[in-house]
Amino acid sequence: MRYSRAFVPTLKEVPKEATMPSHVLMLRAGYARMVGAGIYELLPLGTRVLHKIEQIIREEMDGAGAQELLMPTFVPSAYFKETGRWEAYGPTLLRIKDRKGGEYHLAPTHEEIVTDLVRREIKSYRQLPLNLYQIQLKYRDEPRPRGGLLRCREFIMKDAYSFDVSEEAALESYAHMRATYHRIFKRFGLDYRVVEADSGAIGGKLSAEFQVLAQTGEDWIVACGACDYAANVEVAQAGRAKPPTTFSSEAAPLEKVETPDARSIDEVVSFFGGETTAAHTLKSLLYVAGEEVVLAIVRGDHEVNEIGLARHLGVEEVLLAADGAVKEATGTEIGFVGPVGFGGRIVADPDAVAVPNAIAGAGETPYHYRNVNHGRDFEAGVVSIRQAASGDPCPNCDGALEVYRGIEGGHIFVLGTHYTDKMNASFLDEEGSSRSIVMGCYGIGVTRLIAAIIEQHHDEQGIRWPVNVAPYQVIITPIGKDEAPLARATELYDSLRAEGVEVLLDDRPERPGVKFKDADLLGIPVRITIGSRGLKQGTVELKKRTDSESQDVPMDGAAAATRAALAELGA
Ligand SMILES: [Zn+2]
């Protein structure tokens, strides 16, 4: 492609609401534009990246024996009504009425549609296993679309569905897809972790997320530095933290201190000052758990694992009590709640009860207690209810856990017979008895991955595409006013293209500085610069986007040097 003809509308200024690097860079570098909240168009460069990602997915999915099909996005409501998701999805489901008043929705996911297809067409164990996938638009009316392509209302997903004769066979399909996902994510050039996950609304039994590590991710995960263990902080097993050491472990007398403006842990720590750290304080949070109100205590530097707390209490979920409920249950305000004298049930984390002479809310506004000791000053059920944190021991090995932020790029589930039971999707086994088909499902957020890759691969100057997903592999930049550089650049452009290399030729009459800036912004992995001065010595400059220095290579060997550089980058 000749840059002078390319539709690459770069921007100097981006809208204020774009704060995530991928969002800013996709707008600045002319990859995407917003059409409405959470609705984007991909411009030609963005579309090329999309096609690269789709191609990798197709090659690996087809290689794994899955078959591509295309299901509709505009779907009659009957299928979701059959499984109860018409109600369960709530306002996230985009509902439509047709001219006759018939109810439809724009598909957020396709379990029902594919299960319906399979129940109509699959009759015998001989037709199984089967794995069907599509790369298709999806719709979710997110309350807060954000981060450009990271959380959209319209987006492209790859969704695959496996159908098996038994649970064991389904587990095999799951393991096979897990291995396939590893190949896909490696080819994307991503640093990622596979984490055990809570399966959320899809209703699965076993599931894992492929989390792309990025500072801006909205999921928190812990991963071991020494082995493969990784988990969402919400389900990770927290180890035992070292108790704080600077305070005496001799129980000192309880002391009430007036702390007018100290409500948060940070405020309490700075109020008490000296050697006080968050680890010397107790965080007291009041939760509504079904009919009951429960006080949860964790150490001040830890967070409550609400999913773990709910499981321990045997309820679906726990909700933080609102101001009014706190006042009613404790007689004080949020910020001064504490375990001493609390009348209801208290659940405390082992690391919290291990703190000697802790600082905790006094249950009276505006006071805190100093020297709170479990056993003497309050009683609690002691259960691990905190989120895993950096430095916790790994549950699998001697290594330590580290906390990362991640972007969910893929999610795989064993669904069992959740959908096939509800929708009567069955087959006749070898004995001629009817059994429910066992399902798995496997998603990849295709447009989200464009953003996730940029989140992981960029610098101050712009994007740094991994070579396998770059819109063009090479940009050739002739500089200067002479005719020779452009003529030689065009020759190299033609010869690389003849070999199947994807090249952008920057034939614009721009200054070198402008061309270099744009090349860095666009993120093309290899840049060849051809100038009059180099040509006199028979050389051109080759620079990888990830290197700070360029190297001189002979003009005659430029095509070979370019191919070698691409090979080094993993093309
Ligand atoms: Zn480990």
Image (spheres, helix red, strand yellow):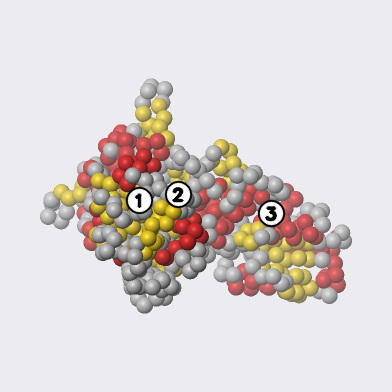
Residue closest to the eye, 356 or 431: 356
Disc nearer the start of the sequence (3/1): 3
Please name the amino acid that badge 3 sits on: Met
Tell me the CA gap for discs 3 and 1: 70 Å
Q: Which residue is mark 2?
A: 157
For the point 86% across and 72% down, which residue is it? 536
Q: What kind of element bears circle 2?
A: strand
Q: Which residue is mark 3?
A: 1
For the point 37% across and 46% down, which residue is it? 332
Q: Seen in the image, is 483 located left or right of residue 145? A: right
Residue 209 position, x and y percent, is 39, 58
**Outermost residue to the top:** 100
Q: Is residue 52 above or below residue 318?
A: below
**Outermost residue to the bottom:** 398
Which quadrant is the C terminus positioned in?
Answer: bottom right
Please name the amino acid that badge 2 sits on: Met
Tell me the CA gap for discs 1 and 2: 50 Å
Q: Seen in the image, is 426 located left or right of residue 300? A: left
Q: Which mark is residue 363?
A: 1
Residue 249 position, x and y percent, is 35, 73
